[in-house]
Image (cartoon, helix red, strand yellow):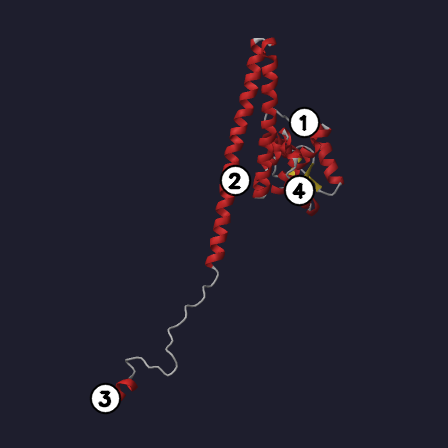
């Protein structure tokens, strides 16, 4: 579980940013986020919570069952601890969500990071999506090369499993392509809108007014008319 600890901590901090939660509700939401095939045990959750509290990233406040409205089904049970994000925790979470290195592209890390894309800036989202696509493309090539070398030595069921794995990766690559296109279009549209707004807010220079040469008078000038009549 050691390698999964940073991923789990990011998921906990991200959920607590939305609202304070106790361990029971945190576990439910984490399992919902990570998927039914990655069921999270209390044995992994509570050590992570204890570590976050010790580092000052979250606080834990004991609350009796009568006070709690987070899980009515548990009323009558012993007091529970409600966890809440601290200012340091918010700053740490923001730093993590702003990162886009290779660690964010891995299978479990990517799922958690993608779950908090609403809290992530557009440029970071695009870098993570592109990194994930690169990682999967490399994996796809490696699997295809391996399949070509070993095809004759594999039975039909192993070949079918291999084909299924390839289709899954290819499907995710297509999904990523669509997401990247959407993010880029959205970013370009925002940039164009910002440019138009900035241009429209810039005052245009006033057009020069029609000026007559010094001493000249327009035809309708009464003085000119009088002079002609006197002549």
Front in this rendered view, residue 128 or 69? 128
Badge 2 element: helix
Q: Nearer the observer, disc 1 or disc 2?
A: 2
181 relative to 86 in the view: left or right: left
Q: CA distance from mark 1 to mark 2?
A: 35 Å
- Residue 2, image quadrant: top right
Q: CA distance from mark 1 to mark 3?
A: 109 Å
Q: Nearer the observer, disc 4 or disc 3?
A: 3
202 relative to 83 in the view: left or right: left
Within 10 Å of disc 3 (Cα), the crowding (few <14, some 14-19, many 20+) is: few
| N-terminal-most mark, 4 or 1 | 1
Above or below for 230 versus 209? below
Any mark on residue 93, and which?
4
Badge 3 element: helix
Q: Which residue is mark 2?
A: 183
Q: CA distance from mark 4 to mark 3?
A: 89 Å
Within 10 Å of disc 2 (Cα), the crowding (few <14, some 14-19, many 20+) is: some
Whether tag 1 and tag 3 are in contact, CB under 8 A, the answer is: no
**x, y percent for residue 98:** 64, 42
Whether tag 2 and tag 4 are in contact, CB under 8 A, the answer is: no
Q: CA distance from mark 3 to mark 2?
A: 77 Å
Q: Nearer the observer, disc 3 or disc 2?
A: 3
Q: Nearer the observer, disc 4 or disc 1?
A: 4
98 relative to 224 in the view: left or right: right
**x, y percent for residue 121:** 58, 44
Any mark on residue 229, and which?
3
Q: Give the residue drawn at x 56%, y 9%.
A: 156
């Amino acid at each position: 579980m050691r390698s999964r600890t940073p991923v789990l901590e990011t998921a906990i901090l991200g959920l607590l940013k939305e609202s304070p939660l106790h361990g029971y509700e945190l576990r439910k939401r984490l399992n919902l986020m990570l998927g039914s095939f990655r069921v999270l045990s209390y044995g992994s959750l509570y050590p992570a919570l204890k570590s976050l509290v010790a580092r000052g990233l979250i606080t834990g406040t004991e609350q009796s069952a009568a006070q709690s409205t987070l899980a009515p089904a548990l009323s009558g049970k012993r007091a529970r601890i409600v966890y809440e994000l601290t200012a340091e925790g918010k700053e740490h979470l923001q730093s993590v969500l702003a990162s886009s290195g290779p660690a964010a592209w891995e299978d479990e890390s990517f799922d958690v990071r993608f779950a908090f894309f609403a809290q992530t800036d557009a440029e970071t989202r695009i870098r993570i999506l592109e990194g994930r696509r690169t990682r999967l493309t490399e994996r796809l090539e490696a699997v295809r090369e391996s399949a070509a070398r070993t095809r004759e030595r594999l039975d039909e069921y192993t070949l079918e499993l291999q084909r299924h794995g390839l289709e899954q990766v290819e499907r995710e690559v297509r999904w990523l392509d669509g997401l990247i296109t959407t993010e880029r279009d959205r970013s370009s549209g925002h940039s164009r809108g910002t440019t138009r707004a900035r241009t429209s807010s810039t005052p245009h220079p006033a057009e020069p007014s029609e000026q007559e040469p010094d001493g000249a008078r327009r035809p309708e000038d009464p003085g000119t008319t009088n002079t002609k009549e006197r002549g």
